[in-house]
Image (cartoon, grey):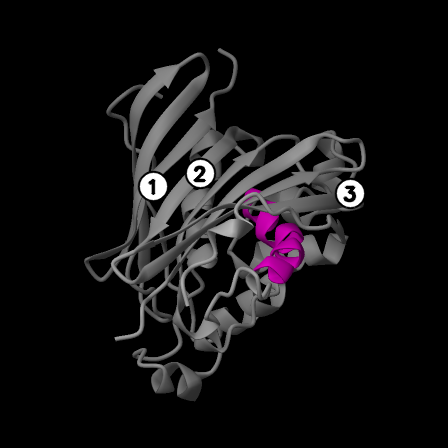
Amino acid sequence: MAVNTGVIGKTYPPAHYAVGREKVREYAQAVGESNPLHLDVKAARAAGYDDVVAPPMFAVVYALPALWPVLFDPDVGIDFSRMVHGGQEFEWGTLVVAGDEITTTVSVADVSERAGNRFYVFTSESANGRGQTVCSGRWSNIVRGAR
Amino acid sequence: MKPGDEIPPLAVTPDRYLTVRYAGASGDFNPIHIDEQFAQQVGLPGRILHGLYTMAQVARAHTEAGGGPQSLKRLSVQFRGMGLPEQELVVTGKVRSVDGGLAVVECGCEQGGRRIIRHAEAELRLPDS
């Protein structure tokens, strides 16, 4: 079955994520962050933030729930068993802190096929409850051809 | 920071159970990261690191060099090869240009001499001086 380029431009319903203090701390500890802004509420407040600050790559946590429907969309037709994550780009705006409610919208930016391999590019736009952009993501996945 | 400067390298050795903790922290439970038997059945040497965990180490090298989470404006990476638990990861980066309060850093991550993140580029907001 040929790759379905008809899905290019498809946008999915926004997904919401409420940022919890202990989730930020759990994530920060898993990736080895030692900056007290991510771990210690008092330190974060002393620096002028309302609560602990999410590390930039916490974008994965609030954006992934918006990505799953795309990855499993039969119109996109990804063969999960052959998928590898080829590349990733994030651009960050306002910092995310515990207590924020993040809304993420995902679109299919590109689908193509070269030499039997399929390339999928998805974009994500995440904003906080004040409408400020917190992160724009570009997710590139490769589905290797069967040999 | 000026062109040609290197950011301080970041070295970290993910322990045996790191992929399990990262799966829980991130919400990505793909079994290739947490199930040794499954990983071997699909032709991998064993459980592999999440690419986005390795990218988080590249991000951390830059936020530490830039003075905090607000310093990282953009990060773009290409994943190549596989990262493995219990082997040291080393992130390095070199400033390519500085313009308008932004530094562009060419960076990457290697493990055991293999570059598992390459063609990576970060933009760092420099503090007002």
Percent position of residue B116, x then y: 29, 56
Is residue A50 toward the left or the right of residue B37 in the image?
right
- Looking at the rendered structure, the secondary structure element under dot 1 is strand
The CA span between labels 1 and 3 is 29 Å
Confirm whether the magenta stretch covers residue A121.
Answer: no
Tell me which amino acid carries mark 2.
Leu
**Do the CB atoms of the residues marked 2 and 1 lie less than 8 Å apart?**
yes
Q: Residues within 10 Å of mark 1 (few under 14, many from 20)?
A: many
Q: Residues within 10 Å of mark 2 (few under 14, many from 20)?
A: many
The residue that appears at 35% across and 85% down in the rendered structure is: B40
Magenta stretch bounds:
A55-70
- Chain identity of mark 1: B
Residue B26 in which image quadrant: bottom right
Which residue position is annotated with label 3?
A100
Tell me which amino acid carries mark 3.
Asp
The CA span between labels 2 and 3 is 23 Å
Is residue A65 toward the left or the right of residue B55 in the image?
right
- Chain identity of mark 2: B
Q: Residues within 10 Å of mark 3 (few under 14, many from 20)?
A: some
**Disc number placed over residue B75 in the picture, else none:** 2
- Looking at the rendered structure, the secondary structure element under dot 3 is loop
Is residue A56 toward the left or the right of residue A127 in the image?
left
The CA span between labels 2 and 1 is 7 Å
Depth check: A57 or A82 in front? A82
Residue B121 in which image quadrant: top left
Percent position of residue A106, x then y: 62, 47
Q: Are marks 1 and 3 on the same chain?
A: no
Percent position of residue B120, x then y: 34, 41
Percent position of residue A21, x then y: 75, 52
Which residue position is annotated with label 1?
B120
